[in-house]
Image (spheres, coloured by chain):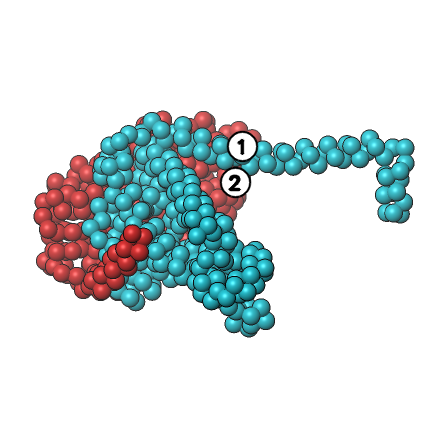
Chain colours: A cyan, B red
Amino acid sequence: MLDATAQAGLVGPGALPRGRSLDAFVTTAVWLGAGLIVAVFFWIVGDVFVHGVGGLSWSFLIDSPTHAGRGGGIGPIIVSTGLILTVCMAVSVPLGVGAGAWLAEFCPSTSLLGASVRRSLDMLAGVPSIVFGLFGNAFFCVYLGMGFSILSGGLTLACMVLPILIRSVEQGFGSVPGEHRRSAAALGMTRARTLAHVLLPAATPGLMAGLVLGIGRAMAETAALIFTSGYVDRMPQSLADSGRAMSVHIYDLSMNVAGGEPNAYTTALVLVASLLVINGATSAIGQRWLCGRSRG
Amino acid sequence: MKHVALMGLGLLLVGTVSGCDNATARGTGADKLVITGSSTVAPLVADMAKRFEQAHPGVRVDVQSGGSSRGIADARKGLAHVGMVSRSLKDDESDLYSFTIAIDGVCMIVHASNPIGSLTSRQVVEVYTGEITNWRQLGGPDRPITVVHKAQGRSTLELFLEHFSIHNERVKPSVVIGDNQQGIKTVSGNPYAIGYVSVGSAEYEATHGTPIKLLPMNGVEATVASVAAGSFPLCRQLNLVTPEPSSGLTQRFVDFAQSLAMHDLIAEHSFVPIVHE
């Protein structure tokens, strides 16, 4: 029955129009899907921009918040966010690249350890962020005695971001053709040199994708940070100080402070803008590094 | 260059890890105070803390948010010097010492376009227990009622249930929300919703153009003024709690928070100050 219809569709007299209309339908659906994604993105960014741009000024970026965030700026909050992100990346990038390289290059595909590492990473990637927040509070703040601090927040975020990072790095290595490894071996390169000079540059796109996703998740995080890096909006003196992240500030202004909405929007605008800048810079640096490495 | 930067960062990390073993509340020196608890009280106390720091150079007061239950737990465990609780202490919490810093009312709100001007206590109970499901039954338009309720563990929820003598299992909510502003946003965005929120923030939002209407309770207008006058029936205390009779810096901060000098801040946060003898 199916065959008959298919044949009729192919050779029958009605075949061409039906094929065309199906074709047109699929084309429209695909374009509509892509258009919708772009529209939603621009709608969100546009909404944040329209509501937030009025409050944006140089002093908003450097001043301290006053009146529970309704007045003043977000200077200390930008600094805290930057520090939390730096701690997170300083810990998670080396660990992520190392673990990803081990999974892809050093661990035999039949290894039980490798399989269990992959399985646990996939599960960790799906754990809700509030769970990481509670874990970070119990482990870093209380057990290790770091208290509410930028360090606790950054380390908690690192735990959260690592699964995504490791899996993307692993996939990056996996996409490098086997000839690269064999050619390197034929040239007498050691395993470490092959990794550093051949595989790592070739796997950079995967690493960059993971990094962009990881930074995005880290910058957007509220639940994991409110219990670890905390709520204090003073300018941090060291990584042992508590510091409020931009996402926590937005959450507090829109949920707990009457009249906090305008500054919440402006902070959201700053957050989205810095996310775009960081992502752009990450890709640019990755590209340059990739070119430099593969030439050298 | 890159390696130097990385090494510098590494050293920075090591330095802070080794330097922060004294960062938990009790272990700190005499000049740092950690306060955690109610997300309703946190913005107010954070503002008070800033003034306290200005008045006492060298002193640091770290205010953390997280909910009343967290304030109680942290004060008990010694993770905080002071807890913030947006209700009176319960019988099983009598091991803590509480200090009231302000009063807040809780009132019913509906959308500004709703023709309903007031509801009796009985009607509120019937709406929340699902016996009344349409505004028509209350003299309004023929539309289903969106019942906005608060999540378990919220002080406002406990106060609401206690005042109307409802068991939480009997409530049939359409929407369950967390914070105060979320309640106001939910009702202002839905012409057929009803909810209960802090009088102070509802009044602030209503006078700043948010389309919500505050319903009177037992005939008393829901305003900050009537809460201040003591005539509004549904009120709660905003408290600071300490695990032991406070002394030293903790005592100084509690006294400061209860002093007359804080009344402008309390009013700015739409709460009602109280006068201590």
The quadrant where residue B107 appears = top left
Instruction: Count residues near mark 2 (Cα–Cα under 10 Å), then give few for <14, some for 14-19, many for 20+.
Output: some
Q: Quadrant of residue A146?
A: bottom left
Residue A231 visible, this angle: no
Q: Along the line of sight, which residue is nearer the eye, B138 or B85?
A: B85
A89 lies above or below A73: below
In the rendered image, the residue lying farthest to the front is A187
Q: Position of residue B246 (x, y in %)?
A: 14, 59
Q: Chain of mark 1?
A: A
Q: Which residue is mark 1?
A: A39
User: Do pointers 1 and 2 mark residues of a single chain?
Assistant: no
Report the residue at 9% width, 45% height from top. Answer: B55
Whether residue B247 is visible, yes or no, is yes
Q: Nearer the viewer, residue B87 or A61?
A: A61
Chain for disc number 2? B
Identify which residue is drawn at 24% across, 32% down: A59
Residues marked 1 and 2 touching at CB (< 8 Å):
no
Q: Secondary structure at mark 1?
A: helix
Q: Residue at x 69, y 34 (%)?
A: A27
Amino acid beneath label 1? Ala
Numbered disc in front, either 1 or 2? 1
Q: Is residue A139 above or below residue B51?
A: below
- Label 1 neighbourhood size at 10 Å, few (<14), some (14-19), many (20+)? few
Coordinates of residue A239 in the picture (x, y in percent): 25, 54
Q: Which residue is mark 2?
A: B132
Q: Quadrant of residue B219?
A: top left
- Residue B272 image point, x, y percent: 23, 39
**Identity of the amino acid at label 2?**
Ile
Relative placement, left or right, of A41 versus B2 is right
